[in-house]
Amino acid sequence: MNSMKSYLLLLSTLCIAVLFSRCTGKMSAQNATQSSRSTKGLKDYYKNYFTMGVAVSPRELRTDAAKLVAEHFASVTPENAMKMGPIHPRENEYFWSDADTIVAFAKKNKMKVRGHTLVWHAQTPNWLFTGANGDTVSKQLLLQRMKDHITTVVNRYKGSIYAWDVVNEAIDDNNQLYLRNTAWYRICGEEFIAKAFEYAHAADPKAVLFYNDYNTENPGKRDRIFKLVKGLKDAGVPIHGVGLQGHWSVNNPSREELEQSIKMFSSLGLQVQVTELDVSVYAGRQGGQLINGQRDTSSTFTAEMEQQQLEKYKMVFDVFRKYKKELTGVTFWNISDRYSWLDGRGRKNYPLLFDRNLQPKKAFWEVVNF
Ligand code: XIL
């Protein structure tokens, strides 16, 4: 009887042990899938295609978002830290700390850095265009100041920055106009563009030099950008690439427009990068500025937005993969929906692949499932 009892006890212990191990086995398999899902970064899915990057600020790199940046991206772009206003606030004063923080973060995590941007009309200090007596500077002095700026900044990060957006947004949006009417243009004429590339190349002959702009899929603007970069190329100016900013939205660009842009610019022997990618959940071009003046005040990420956005992300990454020979980099403009530069337009936007809790959105899985 006693031996019967101990036999039954042994049997039930065995059963419990088997059940338990099956159950924990299943759990660890589940954990493994989840963690391998989250530890495989965007950059790993795309390592045979192009460099995957993201725009960052030193402030965000001091938060938990830093881990996500290092896991998913192989390159960083300073969102603001290297623009002329922030980095060169007064003629004899540079502010390096923010840019240095980003470059150090990239080094520590073995990431590349895209420099952004040397010559632009926005976030540019007034001292640059103002002479000693308060009047507008001469062309000669402006080019000298530009040269000093470019030489100093490019030199400081030589070897750490592999590519620079040398000139940003020089073409006008208006189909009747060509170059944007900026202080650079008014004082120097068209020449400031070629000069910027020459100074950057002289400072770092190894850096890949880009002309960068938005609305590059809009046929009219695309033609004008093409005219500009072809002219530079033909004149022997050291330009190596065209940056398509990629501030897109749920209804733009179309596959055809996007393919056409990549084909046209690469036909000049220039590499193409998508430098500031985000997909606004509101209709319209250039980061959700609404067409017809309509403004959506809703701040909820609706199921419809989610669906439209994931379709757009799926389509553009399909195209990116198709043109992997022409396309050398894709950089997102901001890390997650916790913060986007598009939020500042009176409504919350949700333009990225990670949500406010830094978790991958449905669109993320569309982008990596291929
Ligand atoms: C934006 C930044 O994201 C904002 O923080 C800043 O206030 C304005 O500039 N095109 C560019 C980027 O080339 O430099 C801009 O970045 C977004 C549009």
Image: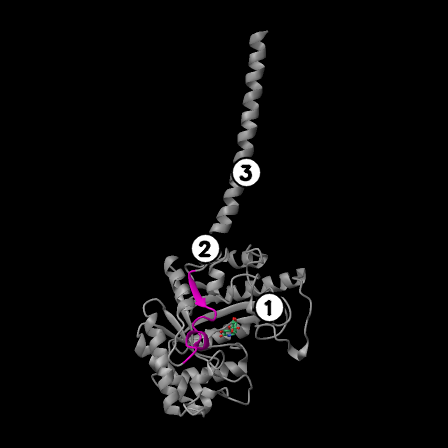
- Please state the extent of the stretch shown in magenta in the rendering: 74-90
| Secondary structure under the numbered disc 3 in the rendered image | helix
As rendered, which of 350 and 83 lies closer to the eye?
A: 83
Q: Which mark is residue 260?
A: none
Residue depicted at 43% across the width and 84% down the height? 128
Q: Which mark is residue 343?
A: 1
Q: Which residue is mark 3?
A: 27
Q: Nearer the viewer, mark 1 or mark 2?
A: 1
Marks 3 and 2, how far apart at CA? 24 Å
Question: Which amino acid type corresponds to the residue marked 2 in the rendered image?
Answer: Glu
Left or right: residue 218 versus residue 46 is: right
Q: Earlier in the sequence, mark 3 or mark 2?
A: 3
Tell me whether circle 3 and circle 2 mark residues in contact (CB < 8 Å). Answer: no
Q: Quadrant of residue 106?
A: bottom left
**Which residue is at the far top?**
1
Marks 1 and 3, how far apart at CA? 39 Å
Judge the density around disc 3: few (<14), some (14-19), many (≥20) Cα neighbours within 10 Å. Answer: few
Query: Where is 4 relative to 81, above or below?
Result: above
Q: Earlier in the sequence, mark 1 or mark 3?
A: 3
- Residue 207: give x, y in percent of width and height: 34, 72
Q: Say if the magenta span includes residue 89.
A: yes
| Secondary structure under the numbered disc 1 in the rendered image | helix
Question: Which amino acid type corresponds to the residue marked 1 in the rendered image?
Answer: Asp
Query: Where is 185 relative to 268, above or below?
Result: below
Q: Earlier in the sequence, mark 1 or mark 2?
A: 2
Q: Which residue is mark 2?
A: 71
